[in-house]
Image (cartoon, rainbow, N blue to C red):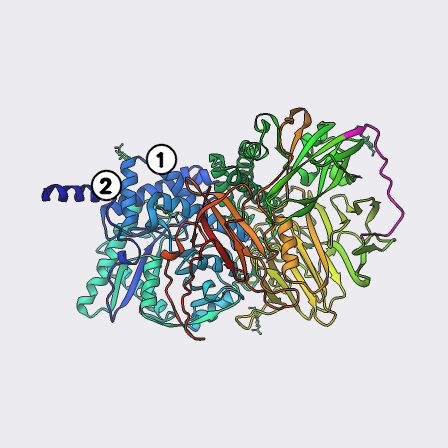
Amino acid sequence: MQSLLVLLALGRLASGTDQRTCGFASCHALKEGMLNVHIVPHSHDDVGWLKTVDEYYNGDKSYIQPANVSRILDSVFEQLMADPDRRFIQVETAFLWIWWQQQNETTRDQYRHLVRTGRVQMAGGGWSMPDEATTHYQSLIDNFSWGFKFLNDTFGPCGVPDVGWQIDPFGHSRETAAIMAAMGFQGTFLGRLDYQDYGLRKNLSNLEVLWRASDHLGAEANIFTSALYDEYGPPPHCCWDVRCRDPDISDGNSESITRSFMTYVNEKAKHFKTNNVMITMGSDFTYMDAKRYYTNTDKLIKLVNARQADGGAMHLVYSTPSCYLKAVNDARPVVATKHDDFLPYASEPAAYWTGYYSSRPTLKYMERLGNNYLQVCKQLSALAGLRPASLDALRREMGIMQHHDAITGTEKEAVANDYALRLSSAIAGSAQLAREALGVLLGGNSSSSAELKSCLLLNISQCDVSEQNDDFVVTVYNPLSRPVSHYVRLPVKNGTYSVTDHAGVSQRVQTLPIPSPVLRLAGRQSEAWQELVFRAVDLPPLGLRNYRVSRTSSVGSVHQPVNSSFIGNTLLTLHVESDTGLLAKMVVNGSEVVVEQNLYYYDAYVGLNGGSGTRTNGAYVFKPKTNTPTPFADKATFSIYKGELVEEIQQQFNDWASQVIRVYKGEEHAEFEWLVGPIQMSGSGTQPISRFSSALRSTGEFHTDSNGRELLRRRRGYRASWNVNITQPVAGSYYPVTSRIAIKDEKAGLEMAVLTDRAQGGSSLQDGQIELMLHRRLGKDDGLGVAESLNDTQPARGRHYLVLGQASLGAGQRLLALRKQLQPWLFLSSTADWPADCKHQYAGLRSALPDSVHLLTLEPWGDDTVLLRLEHIAGTGDDGQPYGSVTVDLEAMFAPLAIGWARETTLDGTQWLSDVARLSWNTTDGSDTASARLNPVGLAVSLRPTQIRTFVVRLG
Ligand SMILES: *[C@@H]1O[C@H](CO)[C@@H](O)[C@H](O)[C@H]1NC(C)=O
Ligand SMILES: *[C@@H]1O[C@H](CO)[C@@H](O)[C@H](O)[C@H]1NC(C)=O
Ligand SMILES: *[C@@H]1O[C@H](CO)[C@@H](O)[C@H](O)[C@H]1NC(C)=O
Ligand SMILES: *[C@@H]1O[C@H](CO)[C@@H](O)[C@H](O)[C@H]1NC(C)=O
Ligand SMILES: [Zn+2]
C-alpha cells in the first residue's frame, strides 16, 4: 500500500503536476558576505521589427536578420531539461503561445514542470513587450491581461509573472508603472533612459528607485524600479551564440575571460546599493544555440565560484529578475523615490527619440480603431452570453500591435504592412461574432439575415452599404456606461435623405459635400460626393438603437458655400481671416480669444550617425534641420458650409495638405480634420505639424497625458528629476500625446486643450502654443537599427478636438477623450435584409453609472464568467479639488443579467487580489507600506479617484 502511494507520487512528479516550488522559493541560495552575481539568461525577441512576427518565429529571411524564435524556444527547453540549476526568463507570450500550439503533451508536461519549479520564469509576460509612449492604457492593460490569461490557464499561478521586463522600449511612462503595480508586480526593469539621467543615476547609485506612479493612488501605484546597467546585453566576451561568436571558454582563455568578467562585475557593483548584481546574459534573439550559451555560462560560474576557496568574494548563481529583486529587498536598502516619468528618451545629445511618437500615423490610427472595435465586440459577446473564438484572434493582434516596434512605426515597411494586414484580418474575422451577438440582443431572426456591416474606411469617407442602398439601417452601439449623443456621418449618393429613429420619429438631417482633396485620394473607391449627418441622441449605456435612412429623392440639394468668415454654435464661434482663410480667433461664452492655427512642416537633418551631434532625423529620432517650421501656405483657399446640425470650413493649403474645421450643434469643442499626404518631400524629409497659437499666457508649462490617463505637468527646457541640458530645443521638448495636450492661463482662468484620435508627438514651444506632429516622410535612416528610411507615402487623415474655456483639466476633458476613444460603433444593413420581428433599441445597463465612473472592461473571461473593470475617471475636479470616492452596486448594474458572484482580482484579471502580497521598501522619503486592499463587502464597490478595480463576475 505504502509503495503504491510512493509510486503514485513519483508518477505525478514525472508528469509535471508536482507540488509547486516556483516564485521566490525556487531561487538559488546566495552567500552572505559575498557579492552575489545573478546570472539571468534571456533572449530579447521582438514581436516583429526587421522581419514579421511569423518570419521571426519560423526563422525565415535570415539574410535580413538571423533570428529564429521557434529554435530559441526548442533549444532553451532542451537545455533547461538537461540541468535543473539553469534558469531562463520567458518574456514575449505571443511567441510562447505559437510554440505551445505546436508541442505534444509530453513536451507540454515537461515545460509545465519547468515553470512550476521556477526554472522557467515569466518576466513581463504581456502578449508583447509594449511601447510606453504611444500606447493607450486600455490596450496596455489588455496586452498584459491576455498574456497572463494564457499563462495562468496553461501553467497556473506559477506562470503569472511578478516583475516587469521593459528592457527595450524607448523611454518609460508613469502609467505603465502604475499598471504594473496594480497587476501585483514586485518591480520592473528598464533598459533605456535619457543618457543624462542615466549618467547621474549611475554616479549616485540611484539606478534603483521606488517609483510613485500616481498623483492620486498612493502606495497602490508604487513600484520598485531597476534601470539596467549598460542596457540589456551580456558582459564583454560573454555572448556565446549563433549571432555573436565570442570564443568558447577553454583552458587557454579561461583565465582572461574570468578576469574580465570579474572586473566588469566589480565595476558595476559600485553603482548598486546591495551585495547583489544582476547580469543580463543574452541579447536580441540569442539562445538559438542554447547548448553553447549554457555550457559556457556553466563554466564561467564554476570558474568564478572556484575562486572562493582562495578567498574570492564573488558568488555566481543562475537567477531571474524576480530572484534578484527578492535578494535586493532582503538586504533592505534605502532607495530614492521618483514621481515623474522617463520621457522623452535621448540616447545621446543629438538623438531625442521623439520622432517615433508620430511615425506611421495610419498604423497608429488603425490600432486605436482596432481597440474601439475590440471593446465593442467584447461587450457585445459578454452581454449576449457568447465566448466566440474569433475574439481571441483580435485580442492577440491587438496585443501584437502594442509591441515596441509595431505601434511605434519603427519597423521596416514590409513589417508595417504585415501588422496592418494581420489586424485588418482579425477585425474582419470578428464581424460574424458581432452579428451573432447583436442577433441575440435584438431578438427575432436578426442574426440570420441582417448584414450588420462595419464601415472601416469612414476616415476616408467610404462605406459600401450607405453608398449603394437607397434604404438602410444604422445600428448605433454605445460602448460607454453613460448615455451619449453622437453625430453619425456617412458617405451617401447624391440625393435627398430622411432618417427615422427606432420609434419612427423623423430626425433632422444635413448633407455636406465631401472636400475635393478627399474625393481625389488615391485608393479611395467610392462614388459618394456627399456625407449625410444626423444626431443619435442619448444612446443608452452599453446599448444600441436602430436608425433607418431612406433616400427620398435622387435630386440633391446643391451644396452652396455661404459667404461668411465664421462658424459656430450657441457655445463657441471660430473666425477665419477673410483674406487668408486661416483661423484667427474664437469666441467662447461671449469672450473673445486670439487663436490662430496653421499647418507647417519641419525639414530633416542628415548626419553621419556616428559621433555626437551628427545623428540623422529618422524613424526614431526627431532632429529638424531648422528649429522653425515652415508654413505650408500663408493663405488657404476655403469654403464655408452651414446647416442645421453642423457648420464647417473646408480649407486647402496645397496639393496634399487640407483641413476641415467644424462645429456641431450642442458640442463644446471644435473639430479639426486634417489631411496630409502623400507627402512631397522637400530635401531629405518633411514632417507636417498642426500648430495652434493662442493668447494664453501659459508661462512655460503644458500638460500631456500619460497613456491616456493622468495628466503630467511639463515645462519647456526642464526635467523634474535632474538639471537637464537640452541641446535640441524642439526635439527635446516633444512629448508623447496619447490622447490630449493642454495649456493653461492661470490669470485669465483659461485653458486650451487639443485631443487626438491617435498617438502623436506634441509640444508647446512658446507660451500660448500647442503643436502636434501629424505625419513624417523621411529620406534617410537614423542608424538605430531599422536600416530603412521612413518613406511613408500614404496619405493620413485624422482629427483634433479643440477645447477652449474655463480651466477644466479634470473630468470634462477626460470624458470627451473617452467619447472619442470609445466611439459609438456603426453597424449597417440594407433594409431588404432587416428582419421585421426584432427590437430596435437595447440597453445593457439598467441605468447610467455615476458621472465619475467608467466601465473600462466587460468581456467573456472564464467558462461562465466575465471580466469587469470599473475606473474612477476623475482625479481632481474642474476646481482643482480632489473628487471623493464613489460606490457602484454591481448587483443592480446589468439590465438583462443578474450577478451570481463577483471576486476581485489584480488589474490583469488572473490573480485573486487576496492571494497577492507585495514587498515593502525603505525609501529616502519614508517607508513604503505595501498597500493591502480589502475585498468589497457584498456587491457594493467603492472606487477612489483614479482607481481601477477588476472583478471576475459570474452572471446569471
Ligand atoms: C514530442 O515532441 C518531442 C519534440 O518534438 C519529440 O522528441 C517527442 O518524441 C514527442 N513525443 C511524442 C510522445 O510524440
Ligand atoms: C488561474 O488559473 C487557475 C488554474 O490554472 C484557476 O483555477 C484560477 O481560477 C485562475 N485564476 C483566476 C483569477 O482566474
Ligand atoms: C453629385 O453631385 C455633384 C455636385 O454636388 C456633381 O458634381 C456630381 O457629378 C454628382 N455625381 C453623380 C454621380 O451624379
Ligand atoms: C550641454 O551639452 C552640450 C552637448 O553635449 C555641451 O556642449 C554643453 O557644454 C553643455 N552645456 C552645459 C551647460 O553643460
Ligand atoms: Zn526590441
**Residue 559 inside the magenta-drawn segment:** yes
Front residue of 859/412: it is: 859
In this picture, is 248 found above or below 749?
A: above
Circle 1: residue type: Gln
Mark 2 is surrounded, within 10 Å at the Cα level, by few (under 14), some (14 to 19) or many (20 or more) other residues, namely some
The secondary structure that most of the magenta stretch takes on is loop
- Confirm whether residue 684 shows in the render: no
Over which residues does the magenta segment extend?
A: 551-569
**Residue 784 inside the magenta-drawn segment:** no
Relative to 514, 435 lies left or right: left
Disc 1 designates what residue? 102
State the mark number for residue 513.
Answer: none
Image quadrant for the N terminus?
top left
Residue 519 in the image, given as x and y percentages of width and height: 75, 36
Front residue of 641/954: it is: 954
Q: Secondary structure at mark 2?
A: loop
Q: Quadrant of residue 500?
A: top right
Residue at 51% of width from left, 59% of height from top? 942
Relative to 732, 582 lies left or right: right
Mark 2 lies within 8 Å of ligand 1 (Cβ measured): no
In this picture, is 889 found above or below 860?
A: below
Q: Are marks 1 and 2 in contact (CB under 8 Å)?
A: no
Front residue of 892/370: it is: 892
Relative to 436, 160 lies left or right: left
Relative to 868, 510 lies left or right: right
- Confirm whether residue 800 shows in the render: yes
Disc 2 designates what residue? 15
The residues bearing labels 1 and 2 have C-alpha atoms spaced at a distance of: 19 Å
